[in-house]
Amino acid sequence: MLRNGTLRNGTFRGGRWLPAVGAVACALALAVVPGRPDGARAATGRCGDPAERPWCDTSLSAERRAGLLLAKLTEDEKIALLASDDPFGGPLGGFFDWAHADTNNGIERLGVPPLYMADGPAGVRQGKATALPAPIALAATFDRDTARLYGKTVGWEAKHRGNDLIFGPTVDVLRTPLNGRTFEGFGEDPYLSARLGASWIRGAQGQGVMASVKHMAVYTQEKDRLELNMAVDPRTLREIYLPPFEAAVKEGGAATVMCGFGKLNGRWACHDGNALNDVLRSEWGFDGMVLSDHTAVHDTAEAANGGLDMELPIGMRYNAFLLKTARAQGKVSQATIDGHTRNVLRTMFEFGVFDRPAYPNDLARVDRTASENAARAIAENGVTLLKNDGVLPLAAPRKIALIGRAARESQSGFGSAKVVPFETVSAEAGLTARAGAGASVAYRDGDDHGAAADAARDADVAIVFATDSQGEFFDKSCLTLECGEPLRGDQDGLISAVAAANPNTVVVLQTGGPVLTPWADDVAAVVETWYPGQEAGSALARVLFGDVDPGGRLPVTFPGAEAHAPTAGNPAQYPGVNKTATFSEGVMVGYRHYDSKGIAPKYPFGHGLSYTTFRYSGLKVSSKQVSVTVKNSGSRTGAAVPQMYLGLPSPGVDVPQPPKQLKGFTKATLEPGQSKTVTFPLSTRDLSYWNVEAKRWKVADGCYTVMVGASSRDIAQRGSFGACG
């Protein structure tokens, strides 16, 4: 690696690139920094002998160790720890087998080890890795244990690619289904996102890598994302967008938090001291480090005073010249610089980075069976059966027609969450293998609707694959399949043509979020597989043939029409006017929007069918807990997902409450005839709303309605507590 030298727009000193004032030199740096061989690392002695370096004494607290080391650092060395050094990081990192997303080179003189980072909300984006199902598929599992498995799998692979820190999970609450990164998050409900995100983090950090929950505090669209000002009232911020981050810190123990792009109420996200200093650190007690999203820092002093610890991908604002200048001008204090350096060091000490050997980059040389099994299990658990007129599970059909390019080419989403898999099992391969030698499987790409209809007409069952396309950088222009993937042609027309030719038509959706389904009443079954990952074919075959029950439930609402979707028809709300998006809908996000306006969705939040049936009985409620008995009333083993919603009383006309809010969920696999009583604990926080005047959570007087059932619109048991008259 180039350790010293001069570039046109900056210099290398001690392995650190120092840009000239105002220079944007990532591209130039790419041309002069030689590539590292796979697995190579800068020489480092890790921490060292405690007799010579007292901060290496593992019996001391992380805070004490950080203080001892901080006292030995020069000012340049302190600043060097506040930005990544890797010009190959950011969007370019995933294109090279050896490239990390970001790297801080550490301070070799004092045994501060390098810090290697990777993208990871859907698997490790560093060369090839196990491509897990998209996070939205994980959200569809409604399963904390599966979330922990997901995080554990990502963490294990991140470690074996030589990383200390993984960028994930993404817990941004979905505001508009047009959001290009819908697939990357956990859907439209803050409670669901909070519980799954915390479990993901515990799984990942249990593998010895640090997680970075993102993107705090509000990040809801790709349109104008680098410049957008989001006008969000305090109650909406507290009740909808902050809870997943709070849970990530308090329940998940997240090592790091990543601030995002854009502005929140006029403050750049990575300069926002209200969010990063007051809420995150002072109120929630976070003592890890705050990282910036790539190029999200706009001003050195504002970021330093606003709570940012480390700039990514390079020190464009956090470099020696600009920070020293800001200090000399009195804009940034030495205590502030020291505080950010201390946060970085303390976090590295707390998570053992100093005290272990560097992780080797050896993923290609270790057994990946567990990761592959996890990818398949997560996919199966997230497959969501939206409609079934009895055609599923498949009963050994002799002739199967597979129609649509997605039968051979799975969609995955693009951007920082895109993973290049080691290998993939296509739907065609998985279904052909499961159908057996006695079955005939015919494939048509669907470009010719007439040929597709002919193949369907000659088959016992026709399975049509349809997909959208979404990812970072761009929002979708509409919710039809054609808007999502125009290169695939008229997919709605293809489905209708096949359905007219064969009454046993199954539509398999591979989408990153909600789409319109105008043909749903004309087909026998609709199956949502999301972006199912590298084991797509194996998982889908097991679900369609009934080897496992479809485990998914919708973490997002599917609208019946474009105009029904949240923020539709209101440019001030989305995409914004004069680059300001006004969140005037308040807390009426997702299914709350549909409920408050009396709009019937096509498929509601929480919906998902099983191959068996369930019966709910025996509801018991109090202000401390809710319990209900769930019985498998069908003839097959299946997964029930009881969901508990609360209707909170409104303390006044200026604090409208949604008709219902998710406050509990669980998953139970039951044999035929088996019953299980499930309990949902209730905390004071579950009963609270954010009181803007008092700036605190408060429980309102009145009647609390309890609703338990199979979805937000399929309520089987009702009760109440409180002052209900």
Image (cartoon, rainbow, N blue to C red):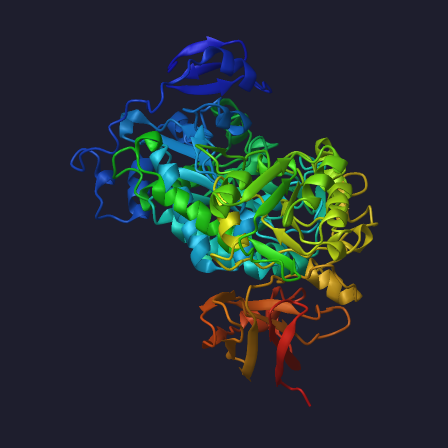
Position of residue 168 measured from the top left corner of the image (x, y, whole percent): 49, 43
Position of residue 597 measured from the top left corner of the image (x, y, whole percent): 79, 65
Q: Which of the image's four quarters has the C terminus?
A: bottom right
**Residue nearest the viewer, comparing 648 with 659:** 659
Which residue occupies the extreme bottom position in the image? 725
Q: Which of the image's four quarters has the N terminus?
A: top left
**Residue nearest the viewer, comparing 584 with 719:** 719
Position of residue 713 measured from the top left corner of the image (x, y, whole percent): 68, 68
Name the side, left or right, on which 98 lies relative to 416. Answer: left
Tell me if residue 245 can be seen.
no
- Please determine whether, in this image, residue 19 is positioned above or below residue 585: above
- Please determine whether, in this image, residue 568 is positioned above or below residue 689: above
Name the side, left or right, on which 508 lies relative to 60. Answer: right
Name the side, left or right, on which 685 lies relative to 46. Answer: right
Position of residue 398 measured from the top left corner of the image (x, y, whole percent): 56, 48
**Residue at (38, 34) in percent of width and height:** 163
